[in-house]
Amino acid sequence: MRALPGLMGPRAPLLPLLLLCLLAAARPSLADGHPSASPFTTPPVREETMAKYSNLSLESHNISLTASPFTTPPVREETMAKYSNLSLESHNISLTEHSNMPVEKNITLERPSNIKLICQFTTSGDLNSVNVTWRKDDEILETNYLNATGSILYTQYMFTIVNSKQMGSYSCVFGEKKEQRGTFNFKVPELHGKNKPLINYVGDSVVLKCKCQDCFPLNWTWYSSNGSVQVPVDVQMNDKYVINGKNANETRLKIMQLSEEDRGSYWCHAIFQLGESEEHIELVVLSYLVPLKAFLAIAAEVVLLVAIILLCEMYTQKKKEHSDDGKEFEQIEQLKLDDSNGIENNAPRHRKNEAVGQ
């Protein structure tokens, strides 16, 4: 069939023109590198998931990279925040410009804690001229806080003690004309034993006791030493030792069937979270010959004393007898002398009588 030219001629170029119009409309958005926005686009997978769980609560978090007026806290403050569940212990020392001796304060610490140390210094001079430093032993620390009120200067140091390396001495030093120092000494609890030696005899039993006042060590250990070397007391290998304790803050060492080899020093050793502490007890073991020797020595002294007294009595008695014999001899001699004198006196008298008679 033959086409009509009047109808087919004008309709032939319509399809190419339509395609060119569509390309021209899409070219600006493609040139910018962004697809044209469409309010009817299909949501991504995570948006479909959120739509699925739309009944759950929505939590929003953001991070700001702009400058903040609150600066980052120092390292030790971050540490204290990390250990915010620990107890806080606060201690203070007061100093004056007329203090002659350093002021010390001993602090017993058993477990990790947050620490606040405060020193106050009273002076009549210019507070601005006072140099304040904190030291741990010989190490200089950063001053945490400094404030002045009237004639009193306050300084504060805050930190956390979590191990034995942080124990020791912390000092606040005020440097003016004369340096003034206040020292906080941190140490673990002390143990209490028997101060005097325990004296026992061979064959007896003895109980050695160590106690920690108001503290609870993690572990107890006993050592014996007969010289400079400490040897752990082994209760497993030796039946003569028994270690027990009624409470967690005390320990007892029972030694049975004592011998002279058991004498010496015994050490109780306690382990805490922040260090260790120990105490020693001196044990003296005597044989029964020792008191017998003392008794014999006393008896010998008594016998010797009695003998000396008897000898003195005998000497005194003999001397008295010699004195009496001498007096008797003198009396006899005197009598003889008197008799002889009497005879001589009577002889002239007889002659005189005879002459008168004639």
Image: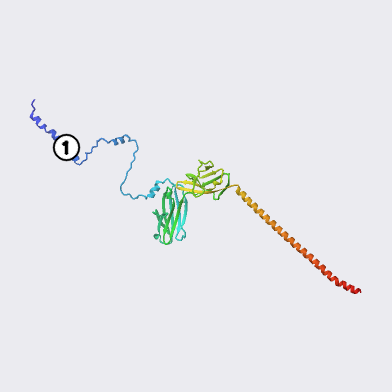
Residue at the image position 69 percent from the left and 57 percent from the top: 311
State the image quarter where residue 59 is shown: top left
Q: Which residue is more in the foreground, 308 or 265?
A: 308
Q: Give the left or right position of residue 334, taking residue 254 as reference.
A: right
- Amino acid type assigned to the residue bearing label 1 in the image: Leu
Position of residue 117 relative to residue 348, above or below, is above
Percent coordinates x, y for residue 263 in the rendering: 54, 47
Q: Is residue 300 visible?
A: yes
* Picture layout, residue 14 above or below residue 181: above
Secondary structure under badge 1? helix
Does residue 246 appear in this view? Answer: no
Colouring rule applied to residues:
rainbow
Name the residue at 67% across, 53% down.
Answer: 303
Q: Which residue is drawn at 16% across and 37% down?
A: 23
- Percent coordinates x, y for residue 345 in the rendering: 84, 71
Residue 339: quarter of image = bottom right
Instruction: State the image coordinates of residue 229 (x, y, percent, origin top left).
Output: 49, 48
257 sits left or right of 345 in the view: left
Viewer-side residue, 180 vs 204: 204
**Which quadrant does the C terminus fall into?**
bottom right
Left or right of 271? Residue 340 is right
The one nearer the camera, 296 or 200, is 296
* Quarter of the image where the N terminus is located: top left
Mark 1 Cα-neighbour bin, 10 Å: few <14, some 14–19, many ≥20: few
Residue closest to the far right = 358
Give the total number of marks visible in the rendering: 1
Camera-nearest residue between 134 and 348: 348
Residue 257 on image: x %, y %: 56, 43
What residue is pinned by disc 1? Answer: 23
Residue at x 60% of width, y 48% of height: 289
Q: In this view, does 9 lie to the left or right of 332?
A: left
